[in-house]
Amino acid sequence: MPGRNFLHIPGPTIVPQRIRNAMAIEQEDMRAADFPEFTLPLFNDLKKIFKTETGRIFIFPSSGTGAWEAAISNTLSPGDKVLMSHFGQFSMLWVDMCRRHGLDVNAIEMDWGEGVPVDRYAEILKADTNREIKAVFATHNETATGVKSDIPGVRKALDEADHPAMLYVDAVSSLGSLDFRMDEWGVDLAVSGSQKGFMLPTGLGIIGVSEKALAARESATLPRTYFSFDDMIAANDNGYFPYTPNTIYLRGLRESVNMLMEEGLDNVFARHTRMAVAVRKAVAAWGLSLVARDEKWYSDTVSAVRVPEGFDGNEVARHSYKYYNVALSISLGKIAGQAFRIGHLGDLNEVMVMTPLNAAEMSMKDLGIDIEPGSGVAAAQEYLRSTRQARF
Ligand SMILES: *Cc1c(COP(=O)(O)O)cnc(C)c1O
């Protein structure tokens, strides 16, 4: 089939040509004398993306799930009490990982479409007068439902209870796309991956670790080898890695960080908001709603669009891929089939974000969903035109 495939799922995201060029290189010696001249500034610049000055960055050759495991296994001990909440596939898997690590998990179940229950966290932390809770977990952006949570609110709940628990944040589908402030929000472990906002292929688990979390590893007894912070620190301090790093991806990451810094993080965030609003205008014009229950939960990186009863959202995604060569994302777990998802993060501009809207609209119409042809695209166009910005 001529023409290109369009990838509009919430990760992996589109890898821009600049990054692909940066990765189209020879293998290199990861023990070369000049390798640290490359790696040390990269670690340093990543701190700017996480917005941390006092924290430390680790890069593991893994997907985001590996970075979760690094966060947990380096800082906690079996039986430690942790406070979590789940409201989608990813927050649920994080709970599962903590359980499998033998932690004593208090996991609050929320409706899919809501986010971290900040008020419940506040009550539980206040009631924990013996300070038994060691860690509080929050999924910043639940990719399965398109729900963004209030991380500063979680910090406030901890502070108001004067509670010393560490704060673990899954920022995999938010970092580099949505406002994220590791130091200001007092995040102790900020977990990310390469294939979302960093616009790279899957394969790097990137994690920001506070001084407090680094200190916690001294008494934490969960086993860790591959994901050991200690081994990483010993090698990273000199600009090297304890085992063979994926140098190609690191070169790609360098380019990604350059791109984010050249655009300016605030502009990156504003662009994501604008693309997300365009998508939401289209959804409203179709007469459909999002899985996210309320405006305060709306994610600016992914939208899960509910299809009317009697229709299958996953069929919309399959149809779009089969007939129009546009990959939309299926819905997972508890809401499987009730929605389809549009990823709108990473390397994206106005006309690019129109593509999944176009394909979704055609697919829904083909499948008999009662929407006005062109209505979503028109609404998105209207918004993008009225907020247009000159490129130069
Ligand atoms: C993508 C993602 C992950 C990590 O998934 P991997 O497939 O292991 O990279 C974790 N949490 C969220 C919220 C995600 O979007």
Image (spheres, rainbow, N blue to C red):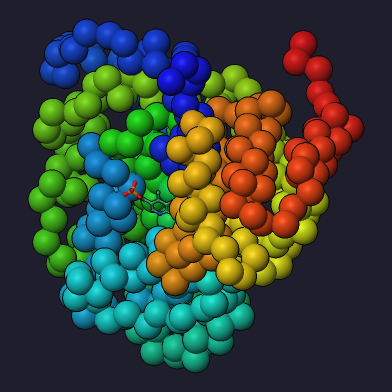
Up-down relation of residue 287 to residue 281 (above or below)? below
User: Is residue 359 among the parts visible in the rendering?
Assistant: yes
Up-down relation of residue 46 to residue 341 (above or below)? above
Choose between 130 and 120: the one closer to the eye.
120
- Residue located at (68% from left, 33% from top): 354
Whole-percent x, y for residue 61 in the image: 23, 37
Choose between 304 and 347: the one closer to the eye.
304
- Residue located at (33% from left, 47% from top): 64
- The image quadrant that residue 301 belongs to is top right
Up-down relation of residue 244 to residue 115 (above or below)? above
Whole-percent x, y for residue 34 in the image: 23, 10
Q: In the picture, which quadrant includes the C terminus? A: top right
- Residue located at (37% from left, 58% from top): 212
Whole-percent x, y for residue 20 in the image: 39, 16
- The image quadrant that residue 243 belongs to is top left
Q: In the picture, which quadrant includes the N terminus? A: top left
Locate residue 167 relative to residue 260 in the image: left or right: left
Up-down relation of residue 206 to residue 25 (above or below)? below
Locate residue 293 relative to residue 316 in the image: left or right: right
Whole-percent x, y for residue 367 in the image: 59, 52
- The image quadrant that residue 11 belongs to is top left
Counting the numbered discs, the total is 0
User: Is residue 149 among the parts visible in the rendering?
Assistant: no
Locate residue 153 relative to residue 243 in the image: left or right: right
